[in-house]
Structure formats: structure tokens, C-alpha cells
Image (cartoon, rainbow, N blue to C red):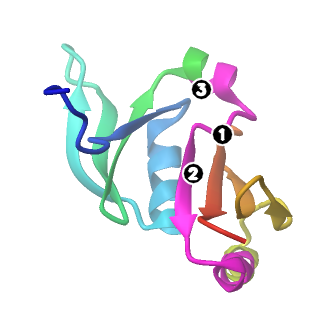
């Protein structure tokens, strides 16, 4: 096949409150903002940047954000069970809600709900 996919360019996450979500993603996951996107009236409704080198966009869209609450559209890879335990300690230290460490079909996992209730998953590649 000549047409191939070479990776993921970015993930876009719908949010209700852009400033609140941006601050949360910066504090919790080290989001580094690179660009702002404005509507025709000049109102900034989106930002793009990265988390651990992965392109991430945050786009104000309250309808989509509320419809995605509880859904886990992205899983960031973490090394192993010890890394999951380090994340639990870190999240507890900064006062961020999270699930207990669980076991998925092929690894340890931990869910961290963002300000809109979207489950951002941390997942190991193996048990």
C-alpha cells in the first residue's frame, strides 16, 4: 500500500472553559501552548501545543465537551506499575482527582478526569 499513516499529528480535546482547561492541562500534564486560535471576532477559542511531544489541541466547544464526559479518548503511555504509583502520588500531592490503579486487557491504567469530566487515561504497555 503506497498510502500510509506515519503517526498521530494531534489530538483535539473539547472543553467548556478554555482558560480553566488550559491551566489544568498545564498544571497536571505539562501542556505547553504553542498557538492560539481566534474566531472571526478575535475571541480565542482554541489553543494548540503538546504534552510529552504529542500534539494536543484544546478547543472550546461546550456541547461536545459535555457529550464526552466520562469518555476516554486518549491514553498517554506510562512505563509500568511503578510509574502508575508515581502518578497517583503526584496527583494526590497536587489535589487532582483520579481513579485507583486498575488492570486493563494489556496493562495497568489510571483515569484522570479533566475539568469537563473527560477521562484522560494513563496506560502501561504491559503488565
CA separation in Å, label 2 and label 3: 17 Å
Q: Say whether residue 47 is magenta.
A: no
Coordinates of residue 73 in the picture (x, y in percent):
58, 37
Q: Secondary structure at mark 3?
A: helix
Q: Earlier in the sequence, mark 2 or mark 3?
A: 3
Which image quarter is the N terminus in?
Answer: top left
Front residue of this view, candidates 106 and 54: 106
Question: Are the residues tagged 2 and 1 within 8 Å (C-beta)?
Answer: yes
Q: Secondary structure at mark 2?
A: strand
Q: What is the distance, in whole Å, between disc 3 and disc 1 at their CAs? A: 12 Å
Bin the neighbour count of mark 2 within 10 Å (Cα to Cα): few under 14, some 14-19, many 20 and up: some
Determine whether label 3 and label 1 are within 8 Å by CB. Answer: no
User: Could you tell whether 57 is left or right of 40 in the image?
Assistant: right
Residue 2 occupies quadrant: top left
Quarter in which the C terminus is drawn: bottom right
Tag of residue 75: 2
Q: Residue furthest front?
A: 1
Nearer to us: label 2 or label 3: 2
Q: Residues within 10 Å of mark 1 (few under 14, many from 20)?
A: some
Q: Earlier in the sequence, mark 3 or mark 1?
A: 3
Horizontal and vertical percent for residue 107?
Answer: 71, 63
Q: Is residue 127 above or below residue 123?
A: below
Mark seen at residue 6: none
The residue where tag 1 is placed is: 72
Q: Give the Cα distance between marks 2 and 1.
A: 7 Å
Residue 124: image location, x then y, percent: 63, 67
Q: Quadrant of residue 72?
A: top right
Residue 65's disc is 3
Q: Residue furthest left?
A: 2
In this rendering, which labeled residue sits more in front, label 3 or label 1?
1
Q: Which span is picked out in magenta?
A: 65-88
How many marks overall?
3
Amino acid at each position: 500500500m503506497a498510502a500510509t499513516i506515519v503517526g498521530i499529528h494531534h489530538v483535539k480535546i473539547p472543553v467548556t472553559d478554555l482558560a480553566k482547561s488550559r491551566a489544568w492541562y498545564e498544571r497536571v500534564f505539562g501542556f505547553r501552548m504553542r498557538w492560539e486560535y481566534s474566531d472571526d471576532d478575535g475571541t480565542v477559542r482554541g489553543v494548540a501545543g503538546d504534552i510529552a511531544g504529542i500534539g494536543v489541541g484544546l478547543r472550546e466547544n461546550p456541547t461536545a465537551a459535555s457529550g464526552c464526559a466520562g469518555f476516554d479518548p486518549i491514553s498517554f503511555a506510562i512505563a509500568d506499575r511503578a510509574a502508575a504509583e508515581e502518578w497517583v502520588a503526584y496527583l494526590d500531592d497536587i489535589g487532582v482527582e483520579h481513579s485507583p490503579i486498575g488492570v486493563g486487557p494489556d496493562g495497568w491504567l489510571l483515569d484522570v478526569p479533566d475539568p469537563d469530566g473527560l477521562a484522560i487515561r494513563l496506560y502501561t504497555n504491559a503488565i
